[in-house]
Image (tube, rainbow, N blue to C red):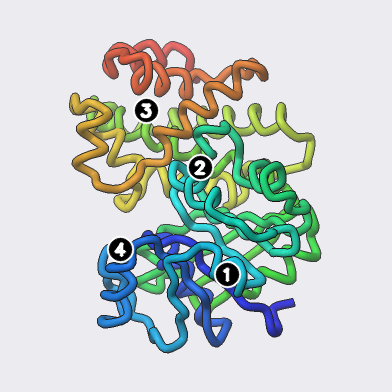
Amino acid sequence: MLQNKRVAIVGGGSWATALAKIVLTNVDEVNWFIRRTEVIEEFKRTGKNPTYLNSASFDVSRIHFTDDINIVVRDSDILILAIPSPYLEPTLKKIRRTMRSKIIISAVKGMIPEKNQIVTEYLHEKFNVPDENMLVIAGPCHAEEIALQRLSYLTIGCTNRDRANQLAPLFQTSYVRTCTSVDIIGLEYTSVMKNIYSIAGGICQSLRYGDNFQAVLISNALQEIEHFTAALSSVPRDIDASGYLGDVLVTAYSKFSRNRQFGQMIGMGYSVKAAQLEMEMVAEGYYGTYCIHQANEKLKVKLPIVDAVYDILYAHKSPMYAIQELTTHLQ
């Protein structure tokens, strides 16, 4: 499946950089779309991404950089999307070439805010990409640990299991192991929702709730994910697997979690705008909270943690009051 296939990375952030590091272990060269020309020039000069994950070194002779999304689409068979969800649609809207025959792998941990859609739904609707040509990357895997070559596990999801198995070797290295799943919807929504629960955990830490409560919070969070994804799709899933539970845990507890950091700042009294400006990185959970809350208007699944985070971020409810109220709904 990978033989003679041209692979592209779309995005210039830390996760895109980590994925490029992984992929270049398994292919001779990659095409790489980075929006800012000055970043490309500095990358070529130093062999490192000057903005993100600067500890990772690259042989730039194996990378074909471009700031033109249409060039990377034209010259690639497999596109790995690793752009923060708020910026994904503005980037993809510039594409003037057919995407139907491309294999598209989404590493986006969020939804399209303007459309309130998961990425695969958007790609199918906007570009008519067949289900069997769309995959997702999920699981507990921080970019910073990939740069350090710490053992990590990824789940490759596709409605076509054979296609997932064919593409999984692209992401296998001595320090990254993979498994596959047909539950693409469950994996995508878990990738969105785990960021919300990470924000909740960060808020609770700043409010001095202890480890005992955090454990209860995440236990209940997993139940929310299980009930919500069951309402969306009847595909069998093991919610305790690393693509679900593992992703929730690492995002909720890791020092590398930007969503947890965002939540900590909100819990300390920062406004949303002030927290975003100080972080200088995208906390996907801020946008995911709105999207999941809106999606649940129809499904009516009980999501008290999502509701509490929504009330804090969008209804401007006091974090202290909202979490205190939330405690009565957990068990």
- What residue is shown at x 41% (from left), y 58% (from top)? 142
Cα–Cα span, label 2 and label 4: 19 Å
**Which of the 4 quarters of the picture holds residue 231?**
top right
Question: Residue 272: where, in percent of width, then height?
Answer: 27, 28
Task: Identify the disc placed on residue 110.
Answer: 2
**Which of the 4 quarters of the picture holds residue 204?**
top left
Secondary structure type for disc 3: helix
Task: Indicate left or right for 269 with 75 as reference.
Answer: left
What amino acid is found at the position of numbered circle 4 in the picture? Tyr
Which residue carries the number 4 mark? 52
- Which comes before the other along the chain, label 3 or label 1? 1
**Which of the 4 quarters of the picture holds residue 163?**
bottom right
Q: Nearer the viewer, residue 284 or 193?
A: 284
- What residue is shown at x 51% (from left), y 67% (from top)? 9
Cα–Cα span, label 2 and label 3: 26 Å
- Which comes before the other along the chain, label 2 or label 4? 4
Of marks 2 and 3, the one in the foreground: 2
Of marks 3 and 4, the one in the foreground: 4
Task: Indicate left or right for 127 with 305 as reference.
Answer: right
Cα–Cα span, label 3 and label 1: 32 Å
Secondary structure type for disc 4: loop
